[in-house]
Amino acid sequence: MAFSNTYDVTNTGSAVSNREDLTDVLTILAPEETPVLSSAQKQRAAATNTEWTVDSLSAPSTAGIVEGADVVTHTDQFAGRARMGNFTQKFRRDYKVSDLQEAVESVGPARIAQAEAKAIRELKRDIEATLCSANVKQQATATDPYKMTGLGGFIDSAAADTTVPAGFKTPASSIYTTTESAANAFSETAFNDIISSIFEVNGVSNGLVLVADVGLRRVISDFARLSTVSTETSIRNVNYDGGVAAIKLSVELYQSDHGIVSIVNANPDCMPNFGGTTANSSGYLVNPEYYGVHELIPMGSTRQLNNGGGERGFVDCALTLGVYHPQAHGLIQDVK
């Protein structure tokens, strides 16, 4: 026959008098870090189309000059200048809380101030995802919004892409794209090749930051610990201090021949996979000196009229990404 049980709280029986055990703890189950946004220079925008100019130097000459030769031709030193730009994109998140919810006690709590704070956190993730995207800028129309070009759109060697003028595109050697073949798996040599390629353009030891997704970060950490001998590829080599009871298996700084690379975790919810087959396996190798965020409308919150149902409002901002030197950055796509 039927009996009273602890799982039925809608029908009559002993369960209806059981107390609820709801801990006063609220956990956000999503990554919130925004390393690209946080490390970018902050600039002020004054228009919906933010632009900057780029220039380059001619190749060095070792030809020498004949004694007594006159100067009969003159070079336009500014002939190679080009203009680049990006459209300002608007971001918005809305929020509201009913008058009854505002009045009751709840875990969190769940009032208008908390709704506003959560909307701001979501807005920052929207910005981070757009900065990290491979989007290409879009002109606004009556029905379409402005869209900005993301890092993946600037760090692109494709000749057909007009986002970056032809003479200033990122070299193909600064972009790693894997294939399905295990022989083409990302290696320490490939990583150093990208760093060296960036150095060949800049000519300075770069203070680079690798914003690495989950899979890429683990590959980088294994560089110094996996044997290169074909018969020992699965053996980890670790330098261990016998007086310390911990073995460090993560890499935060990578010192190469052409600069030190700081390695930080990307927000896995905000990184694209560039159409590849492996998720969470890409990364941007960026030089913070050569990119920034230009704000047209700073991030802020606006409360709207309460028509009787409860408090409501929205948070918004308008900004764009400026990549002042596309050749000073690198990209690692879809590591296997």
Image (cartoon, rainbow, N blue to C red):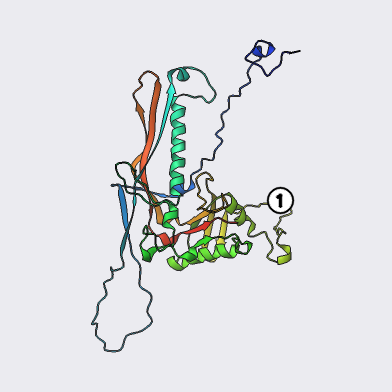
Q: Residue at x 53, y 48 (%)?
A: 266
Between 254 and 14, the one lying in front of the other is: 14
In the visual, does 320 lie left or right of 9? left
Under mark 1, the amino acid is Val
In the visual, does 328 lie left or right of 67? right
Extreme residue toward the right, this view: 1
Count all numbered tags in the image, as a single digit: 1
Q: Residue at x 53, y 55 (%)?
A: 262
- Residue 214 at x, y = what percent? 58, 49
Q: Note whether 142 is above or below 105 in the view shown.
A: below
Extreme residue toward the front, this view: 1
Extreme residue toward the top, this view: 12
Q: Note whether 7 is above or below 177 in the view shown.
A: above
Q: Residue at label 1?
A: 244
Question: Where is the C terminus found, in terms of image quarters?
Answer: bottom right
In the visual, does 290 lie left or right of 281? left
Between 176 and 248, the one lying in front of the other is: 176
Q: Is residue 210 visible?
A: no
- Residue 193 at x, y = what percent? 53, 66
- Residue 254 at x, y = what percent? 57, 58
Q: Residue at x 44, y 61 (%)?
A: 328
Extreme residue toward the bottom, this view: 67
- Please rate how many residues cluster around mark 1, counting C-alpha atoms within 10 Å: few if below 14, some from 14 to 19, many from 20: few
Q: Is residue 123 visible?
A: yes
Q: Secondary structure at mark 1?
A: loop
- Residue 111 at x, y = what percent? 46, 24
Q: Note whether 114 is above or below 12 in the view shown.
A: below
Q: Residue at x 30, y 47 (%)?
A: 48
Question: Where is the N terminus found, in terms of image quarters?
Answer: top right
Between 25 and 245, the one lying in front of the other is: 25
